[in-house]
Image (spheres, grey):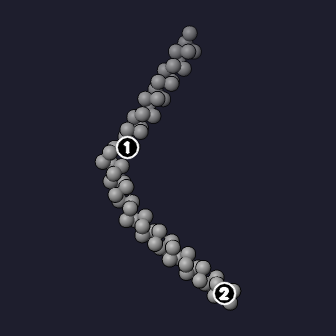
Amino acid sequence: MEGDKLMFNIIEMTLTIGILWTVIAFTWVPLTTTVEKTQLVNKTKQSVHNIYTDITGKVKKHYEK
C-alpha cells in the first residue's frame, strides 16, 4: 500500500516535470526572439553604463575638491 502511493507520486512528478519541460521549450523561442527584437538587453546595458559613468564622475569630482 505504501509502495503504491510512492510509485504514484513518482509517476505524477515525472509527468508534471515532462509537461513543464515541454511548455518551457515551446515558450522559450518566442521569449528570446522578443528580447532580441526589442533589444532590451542592449538598452539595459546602456542604461547601467550611463548610471555608472554618472556616479563615478560625481565621486571623482567630489574627491578632487
Residue 12 % position (x, y): 55, 78
User: Which mark sits nearer the N-terminus, 2 or 1?
Assistant: 2
In the image as oriented, which residue stretches furthest toward the top? Answer: 65
Rendered view: 47 above or below 32:
above
Residue 49 % position (x, y): 44, 32
Viewer-proximal residue, 26 or 64? 26
Rendered view: 39 above or below 3:
above
Crowding at label 2, few (<14), some or many (≥20) Cα neighbours within 10 Å? few
For the N terminus, the image quarter is bottom right
Residue 3: numbered disc: 2
Crowding at label 1, few (<14), some or many (≥20) Cα neighbours within 10 Å? few
Which residue has dot 1 on it? 40
> Which residue corresponds to the image point at 37% horizontal and 55% vertical from the top-left?
31
Instruction: Please state which amino acid type lies under the numbered disc 2.
Output: Gly
In the image as oriented, which residue stretches furthest toward the left? Answer: 37
In the image as oriented, which residue stretches furthest toward the right? Answer: 2
Residue 1: numbered disc: none
Judge from the rendering whether residue 23 lies leftward or rightward of residue 2; answer left or right: left
In the image as oriented, which residue stretches furthest toward the bottom? Answer: 1
Q: Secondary structure at mark 1?
A: helix
Instruction: Please state which amino acid type lies under the numbered disc 1.
Output: Leu
Label 2 to label 1: alpha-carbon separation: 50 Å
> Which residue corresponds to the image point at 55% horizontal and 81% vertical from the top-left?
11
